[in-house]
Image (spheres, rainbow, N blue to C red):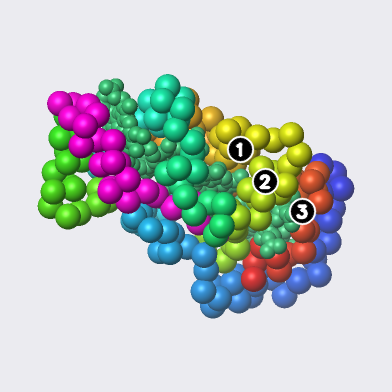
Amino acid sequence: MKRYSNRLYEGLKRISLGSAALLVVFAAVPGTGWAEVPNAVAPKGAHAGDDVPQPIEFPHDVHAKINQINCMYCHTYARRSKVAGIPPTSKCMGCHTIIATDKERIKKLTEYWESNQSPPWKKVHDVPDYVHFTHEKHLDRFLFSNEGMDVERVSEVCAFCHGEVKEMTVAKKVKSLNMGFCRRCHEANDGPSDCWKCHK
Ligand code: HEC
Ligand code: HEC
Ligand code: HEC
Ligand code: HEC
Ligand code: HEC
């Protein structure tokens, strides 16, 4: 922790033109923002991400824990791109044209489907646009290239950064995802420490 703080301090000192200038540079670079995430809309304003009112309360516990649906079955892009993605309604309807059709929330889902609209899911996690993040590299390192880590245990890897989503009745942000959080893990696991890896 001490070593980490010193190194960060040195780094910040080096670019002592000030973080204001640095931020201008970051802001000029097209970011990896939510805009690229299929089926999800932007939070309005400086949204902290804790309690996000969703168009339909989607119970992760019912799907991922009770019914054991793999996280990557719905968040299909995670293994091969920057974003994890939110599943299209057609994926839901694969089950919900038959399952729980009498439930209020499924009726609402069916209304969206029949009117050719996606529920406007709101983003819960959103790092600033000047931060470069990619799911693919992290899943490769901690799941696919991790000997003894079976794909069925994917939720443990997601939990490093998202907490125990499979226990949640509504997705919530429980990890800070700030620079200290990212850098501590990079330091402990030989991830890149170069500023420009996360800020290109
Ligand atoms: C692989 C099948 C499957 C898929 C795909 C699926 N669900 Fe479900 N869903 C279930 C099952 C099983 C239940 C539990 C039904 C029950 O308790 O009667 C459920 C329950 C629900 C409930 C709770 C209903 C209630 O009020 O009790 C909601 C809301 C829901 N699903 C929404 C969705 C949405 C939105 C999607 C797409 C993002 C989706 N589901 C995709 C199988 C699925
Ligand atoms: C049946 C489909 C389905 C499964 C399975 C599923 N999710 Fe989701 N997930 C969704 C939907 C729909 C949303 C958008 C609604 C919301 O945010 O509550 C979502 C949202 C999320 C979010 C918040 C995204 C954001 O906006 O920041 C995270 C994190 C997440 N899921 C992680 C997981 C993890 C981890 C697992 C496995 C334990 C998992 N999901 C399993 C459908 C699914
Ligand atoms: C190393 C940390 C980390 C891991 C591991 C991780 N995520 Fe994420 N996730 C993030 C960050 C950071 C964001 C916000 C990205 C942004 O705002 O550009 C995010 C965003 C998301 C979102 C919102 C939509 C999107 O794609 O931006 C979903 C859904 C999601 N993650 C699901 C998952 C699932 C499912 C797993 C496991 C298969 C997982 N994440 C593993 C850090 C992680
Ligand atoms: C659970 C530990 C862990 C956490 C948390 C984590 N990372 Fe990483 N990250 C790694 C490791 C390990 C690598 C090196 C992966 C490899 O190259 O095999 C890496 C690689 C990267 C890369 C390099 C990708 C490339 O193109 O080479 C970026 C960028 C990155 N992480 C950004 C972030 C950001 C931003 C956060 C915080 C939101 C974060 N990471 C959180 C462990 C982590
Ligand atoms: C592992 C990824 C990672 C690395 C490496 C990294 N940063 Fe960051 N940085 C982040 C994240 C994530 C944020 C956004 C924090 C937030 O959401 O408030 C951030 C925010 C910032 C900010 C915004 C100011 C603030 O605190 O709000 C500055 C300036 C910055 N970083 C400079 C640096 C410098 C200089 C280095 C190299 C010494 C560096 N970063 C290395 C991930 C990283």
Q: Amino acid at mark 1?
A: Val
Whichever of labels 1 and 2 marks the residue nearer the N terminus, that label is: 2
- Residue depth check, mark 1 versus mark 3: number of the one nearer the observer: 1
For the residue pair 200 and 76, the one nearer the viewer reads as 76
Image: magenta residue range: 82-103
Q: Residue at x 36, y 30 (%)?
A: 59
Mark closest to the chain's N terminus, 1 or 3? 1
Between marks 1 and 3, how big is the CA–CA gap? 22 Å
Q: Nearer the viewer, residue 22 or 122?
A: 122
Residue 113, labelled with which disc? none
Mark 3 C-beta closer than 8 Å to ligand 4: yes
Q: What residue lies at 34% left-to-right and 55% top-to-bottom?
A: 39
Q: Residues within 10 Å of mark 2 (few under 14, many from 20)?
A: some
- Residue 68 image offset from top left, x and y in percent: 46, 27
Q: Secondary structure beneath disc 1?
A: helix
Task: Name the residue beneath numbered marker 3.
Answer: 191
Expressed as whole percent of the image width and height from the top left, the position of residue 70 reads 49, 36
Report the disc number at residue 151: 1
Marks 3/2: CA distance? Answer: 16 Å
Quadrant of residue 42 in the image? bottom left
Under circle 2, the secondary element is: helix
Q: Quadrant of the C terminus?
A: bottom right
Question: The disc labelled 2 sits on which kind of residue?
Answer: Phe
Q: Which residue occupies the extreme top position in the image? A: 66
**Circle 1/circle 2 CB separation < 8 Å:** yes
In 3D space, how far apart are the residues under numbered discs 1 and 2 (Cα atoms)?
7 Å
Q: Residue at x 25, y 42 (%)?
A: 93
Q: Front-most of 78 and 148?
A: 148
**Quadrant in which the N terminus appears:** top right
Q: Which mark is residue 144?
A: 2
Looking at the rendering, which quadrant does residue 193 occupy?
bottom right
Residue 192 visible (yes or no): yes
